[in-house]
Amino acid sequence: MMQLRPVHMKIAVVGGTGHCGRGFILHWSREHDIIIGSRKAEKAEKYSEEIMGYLGDHGVKAEVAGMDNESAIASSDLVVLAVPYRFVESVTKDLEESYSDQIVISLIVPMSRVEDHFEYTPPPQGSAAVLVKDLLPSTVKNVSAFHTISYTVFQDLDRTLSGDVVICGDDMASKEVVADLVRDIKNLRTLDGGPLKMAAQVEGLTPLLLNISRLNNIKDAGISVIEG
Amino acid sequence: MMQLRPVHMKIAVVGGTGHCGRGFILHWSREHDIIIGSRKAEKAEKYSEEIMGYLGDHGVKAEVAGMDNESAIASSDLVVLAVPYRFVESVTKDLEESYSDQIVISLIVPMSRVEDHFEYTPPPQGSAAVLVKDLLPSTVKNVSAFHTISYTVFQDLDRTLSGDVVICGDDMASKEVVADLVRDIKNLRTLDGGPLKMAAQVEGLTPLLLNISRLNNIKDAGISVIEG
């Protein structure tokens, strides 16, 4: 049976005013409706003005909305959780009534700095992605992605990202939707990383890449899976 | 102060008659003394004959010895533990009297097959590398490496490996020795992955790469860290 995929989606970027959320807004606002979510609606609205200005300067005419997280999530088909690990409960469990059957992308990485390096510090569930799944209603479709790209490059429309985005999840149709969204971003390749449980191995790549970057003087490190 | 590095080393490949050990013997026997270790000396001796034949067919004239694991380890400067995870105790704790101050490279990955995919199943210590360290005398220098290369390509002198070898360990001098050994293998790049504790994130790449390989039809997958 042929699968029909949504061409035009409503995408809520929760934590959209932060470092990690910006790239999604910039890259996906050409083709999709973006709703920036923040704890305070005014902050999201103000940021949406700024980002529409930046987009305009880059020749992109797009409407970007700003709302509080609850409204952003409730209005969307797909939610990007672009928040630091410490906010994981406040954007899932605490807002569970805003969720229905969205696809939820977690790019959250539990990690901490120990002396001069970063370590991966997952919760007992094994990964942030599985924790998110446990905290959200079972009607939501959980996908894990975007742990292995440079957010510095991602949030700069004058630069071109490269590398692989590894997508993990248990629902193949949702993974396909996310893979299509990755393909909307010039030059990125999408790879199926298997079930959501494998997200632990992909999340762990973020601290590893940060350390490799510093120790080997590789700027804005990403990853590419190569054929032998 | 200038560091002096051993140019010509005595390298024991424990589990050298198996799938993962073969590549080290083939690639390092040009420049170093290789001792194949096995539980039975005769098996190692027989395999050394076979491998010297294969090397000769490829224009490499090298002496490769075969011994039981105890003798191989005791005779060496550096030990490669090329055994499956289930043998980790039998080549460390059970042979601890053979070890003195060698550099020990662990490429061991604790993983298991669950339905159609592989999962990383580390011990309570967090990784095989840290378990190996805990099981060996404290005079040994532990290094973790070679988890992200294709062993199919590695054991075939007619093919050229590519990609990155991520080296983890707490002793910088030992990591430098291993990095030099990686450079002896044509086309491989070596990356410092940080302290031994980070080995968990590198070991986890093996099952992830096996799954990515199957799901995305990428043959003999390896990894390359790219600059953004």
Image: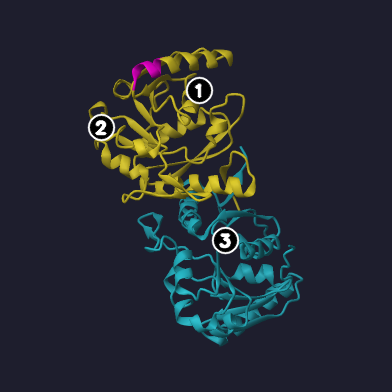
Chain colours: A cyan, B yellow
- Res A214 label: none
- Res B94 label: 2
In the rendered view, tell whether residue A150 sits above or below residue B62.
Answer: below
Subunit ID for the residue under disc 3? A
| Three-letter amino acid code at the position of disc 1 | Leu
A228 lies left or right of B101: right
> Which residue matches tag 1?
B26
Magenta segment: B40-45
Q: Would you identify the image quadrant in which residue A147 lies?
A: bottom right
**Residue B140, position in %: x, y?**
28, 34
Task: Look at 54% across and 70% down and name the residue there.
Answer: A82
* Disc 2 and disc 3 on one polypeptide chain: no
Q: Is residue A67 magenta?
A: no
> Which residue matches tag 3?
A146
Label 2: which secondary element: helix
Check the image and name the residue furthest to the front.
A1
The answer to whether the residues at label 2 and label 1 have Cβ atoms under 8 Å apart is: no
| Three-letter amino acid code at the position of disc 3 | Phe
Q: In which quadrant is the N terminus of chain B drawn?
A: top left
Q: Is residue A71 visible?
A: yes
Task: Look at 59% across and 46% down and name the residue there.
Answer: B214
Label 3: which secondary element: loop
Q: Would you identify the image quadrant in which residue A112 lies?
A: bottom left
| Three-letter amino acid code at the position of disc 2 | Asp
Q: How many labels, in total?
A: 3
In the rendered view, tell whether residue A99 sits above or below residue A208.
Answer: below
Label 1: which secondary element: helix
